[in-house]
Image (cartoon, coloured by chain):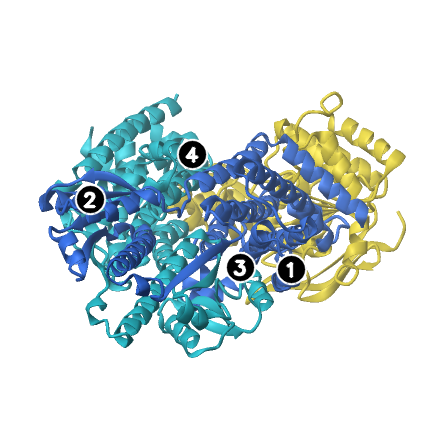
Amino acid sequence: MNLRRTVAMSRKEFTQVRRDPYSLVVVLFLPLVQILLLGYGARLDANHIPVYVLDQEGSQDSQALLKAFQASPYFDVIKAVDNYHALVRAIDADQCKLGIVIPWNFSERLDDAGRTSVQAIVDGTDDNSAQLAEGYAQAVVATYANNVQLDWFARHGLSQQVTIPLSVDYRTWFNEDLESKNFIIPGTVALVMALMGALLSSLTIAREWERGTMEQLIATPVTALEIMVGKLVPYLGIGLADAILCAVFAVGWFGVPFRGGLGAFFLATTLFLIVILGIGYMISVATKSQLGASQYALLVTLLPTSMLSGFAFPIDQMPAPIRAITYLVYSRYYVSALKRIFLSSAGISDLVPEVVAMIIYALVIGFFATRAFHKSLQ
Amino acid sequence: MNDAPSIVVDKLVKRFGAFTAVNQVSFQIRSGEIFGLLGPNGSGKSTTIRMLCGLLTPSSGSATVVGLDVARQAEEVRQHIGYMSQKFSLYNDLTAIENLQFFGGLYGVKGRALDERIAWAIKMSGLAGSEQLLTGELSGGWKQRLALGCAVLHRPQVLFLDEATAGVDPLSRRQFWELIHEMSREGVTILVTTHYMDEAEYCNRLALIDQGLIVEMGTPTKIKQTAIKGDLLLVECSPLGGGLAAVKQAPGVLEASVFGAALHVVVSTGRQPLTELPAFLAAHDVRVGRIELISPSLEDAFVSLTGSRALGSESYQ
Amino acid sequence: MFDRIWCMIVKEFLQLRRDKYARFRLLVPPIIQMLVYGYAATFDVNRVQIAVMDFDHSQESRDLLSRFTFTGRFEVAKVLSNEQELKSLIGRSDVPMALKIEPGFAELLRKGQTAHLQVIVDGTNSNTALIAVGYVNQIADQFSQDYATYRLEQMMPALAAVVPQISLEQRPWYNPDLNSQWFFVPGVIGSITLMMVVTLTAFAIVREREIGTLEQVMVTPIRPLEFILGKTIPFFVVGLADVILVAVVGTLWFQVPFRGNVLVLLLGVVLFLLSTLNVGLLISTLSSTQQQAFVLGFFFLNPAFTLSGFAFPITSMPKAMRMITYVDPLRYFLVILRGTFLKGVGLDILWPQMLALALLTSVLMLISVARFHKSID
């Protein structure tokens, strides 16, 4: 492989990218927009859950329970209604996601039989928010119930029973406040790299065919390998620069921690970019129109990376056949590496499985890409 | 041919922001006439035609086609005109018949009349037997005639051809012009824009347009005769470039430019250029080969009138 | 007028039929998306893999730990014997959660003191972690209650009966099993239709502009509005067909219920289709090449999809983003879809969404038709 010819190809490719408005948009504008969009928009936390309450008793006790709900940072007690029908209508109409019903004999039953219950109606449409809401509601009621119990024991002079039998101590590693942004945004970097890399590299060969410059290129002594390497190296550089941009944004703007090694970050990103650029290159070779190439590039990267890489949806919750498929999804390894690099202090030695998987992928893709290009010339 | 002019253009202007593409253009065309608008790319001929078709709104001035105002009665105008541009914009993924049926439908040609016109168009384009071929599979010449057929299914009184023969082989162009002439004989007014000089010769009258202005109007013969104010000579010399620079300084030389491998030089009448010029050039180290008087072509006329060059001739800048 | 529109519709369908890839593009991506979203997109929290370290080995500790697996939400992946194993397990994100019980657990309980359950959580998938924490709390609370009652019964049986206990009965409505598929599959109807109709319409019109047939058609007596109708009606039909396809496959394959009124859904579908057609039209007036249409389409569809409430709840977004969603037709259509499929509500509840869609469509239509007029000038 002749280095000089390869460098000449790289230089030409880089100049073309610099002058092409579309490419510039993809390189500069797209990553930022994507990070902002997903960074702010892709939140799975449930905060300010709208709640309606129906206090059928209106006693001091019931009011105290309602206050507990109001005090919770997760709930926004928006309205108190006075009949069940209004509550039903509110949930139907998306005005609240949770409806609390305190029965008319709440404190009465508490005094007599000691047991009473509170009803919660949860809008189960969005099962994620529903589960979170249920968990938070449970916690509020449990705390209130414990306080009521302690009070009762104190009033009956039973001080030795004032302890709660079981207390749970939580230690959260890596994402202490369990904020969804901290685990989604590292994955977003992967998505941006995938999109950007594929969109850019998928155009490279198709553009030459469409403009008619490919024939001239083939007439020169440059080899297929030199063309491929020469064309993709600038994109690798651009991709790395963009990755840095994204990481800086993630840390500086969104406050996502970055605890791992920079070396690991660069290695993982470089390997991932090689895979992505290879895929885009193959698309470009196979599709002689730029438009078709961009569309395929989008299809082949966006869907797998957003759905099957563990970016937002946990892989271990997927059904077994789908879990098996995700082993073939190249972005899965990069997303996993990124999360560990950002949130835990993973270095290269901790990421051996991911790195190995990506190296294998890169080699396989590289092999097929060169072969595909050879075949297309015939 | 009746007497009322088919197309009347009066001080038509089109501005795009600060740029004036068409500048106070005026002319009249009689019905059945083949009128050519000749000029280089960017001279405003396409813009003028598009205004007449109702595709662009004039900035000022007026134009009527078969008595209808193109600005205010644009839709009615379109019922009476046919238009064809150099892109032969037909649907490549439809067959010839489907294209004809489609455009016929848009023009409101139905039933029996449509069948007849389609049959005529197929025959005229030489596509009998190939009607079911996809238009994209046809070669340039056939597509061109098919596009013409699509444009006239409704028997329009006026036909606009905007560089309609660009990129087509000369034989097909010749056949195309035969069709044009036939239509002209039937009374169809035809406004053609072109930068091919040989096509300009086919027109009844020409208007030379450059940078949005009409620089000359008349029959091809008249233009050739009157445009050049002087004698036109063909001069072969070497070096060519040096010869051009030198000859421009020769006494009596009004204009000179390169035409192919030689120079065309305009000398004021009443001189002896056949003897004077070689001597003058020799004195400037330029060797002269062939030198003779020639009659002006339209290209010469155009160059003389505008100082610029239209493409499509064998000359280069 | 109708003749000319009909001419355009016939031509469009002829072209669609001839396009070999069209059939592929119209059928395969919807089905794939539906399968992927139906199966891969999940917020379920089941069989969460946990590691347990029980250093107490008492009846009480075993009781507590068994409650976790009993709910079906957790599965014991590994039993650990030392702290080092725990570090590497969580450190490698091999299990999302680990439970640790120190020696002396049961003793503390029997003495009436507070015993501790240590829960170590891997925060890298915080969503699952948060939900799992909720379940842990529930199990722990129940254990506490039960044990306290048990102690009381032993010491003062008379009192045990009247100790106040407040429980929370939760009933999830519309989706009682909290099945993620029921949430996503109706949504997929909307997202697929949005992407398909917008891109098809935009590309179709821009293609005519690119190859020049737009001009050739505009020079005929056809009016711009007739052209627009002629172009968009076929894609309305295609969009409608796709909606029906995805809806039918979705309900049959994933067993998603449909509890509402089909006519209400149909009204929503029609309004939504109209709005997406107009978005496609607007994009086409802003692009002169298909490549530009692709870029513009992407910049619209990407946020329209992400912020629509399809996967991420709108209420969790910051205010600025929430504002943006008010001009996203998919947002309203998703409410209509989930309302008719899962909630079974009717027009009396869904009229604000219908109105919003109608308004959005009208405004888009005015802008795009006006721009279309200008763009052919």
| Percent coordinates x, y for residue C182 in the rendering | 50, 46
Q: Which chain does the numbered disc 3 sit on?
A: C
| Percent coordinates x, y for residue C371 in the rendering | 62, 60
In the image, A301 versus C184, the foreground residue is C184
**Residue to which mark 3 is pinned:** C328
Whether residue A358 can be seen here: yes
| Percent coordinates x, y for residue A245 in the rendering | 26, 56
**Residue to which mark 1 is pinned:** C365
Which of the labelled discs sits on residue C52, or is there none? 2
Q: In the rendered view, would you say A93 is above or below C92?
A: below
Query: SS of the residue at dot 4?
Result: helix
Whether residue B53 can be seen here: no
Which label sits in the foreground, 3 or 2?
2
**Identity, as a three-letter code, of the amino acid under mark 3:** Asp
Q: Are marks 1 and 2 in contact (CB under 8 Å)?
A: no
Query: SS of the residue at dot 1?
Result: helix
Which of the labelled discs sits on residue A209, or is there none? 4
Chain with yellow colouring: B
Which of the labelled discs sits on residue C216, or is there none? none
Q: Please identify which colour was used for chain C in the image.
A: blue
Q: In the rendered view, would you say A282 is above or below A164?
A: above
Q: Which chain does the numbered disc 2 sit on?
A: C
Q: Please identify which colour was used for chain A in the image.
A: cyan
The earlier-in-sequence mark between 3 and 2 is 2
**Identity, as a three-letter code, of the amino acid under mark 4:** Trp
Q: Is residue A231 left or right of residue A257?
A: right
Q: Residues within 10 Å of mark 3 (few under 14, many from 20)?
A: many
The earlier-in-sequence mark between 1 and 2 is 2
Q: Residues within 10 Å of mark 2 (few under 14, many from 20)?
A: many
The earlier-in-sequence mark between 3 and 1 is 3
Q: In the rendered view, would you say C140 is above or below A301?
A: below
Marks 1/2: CA–CA distance: 61 Å
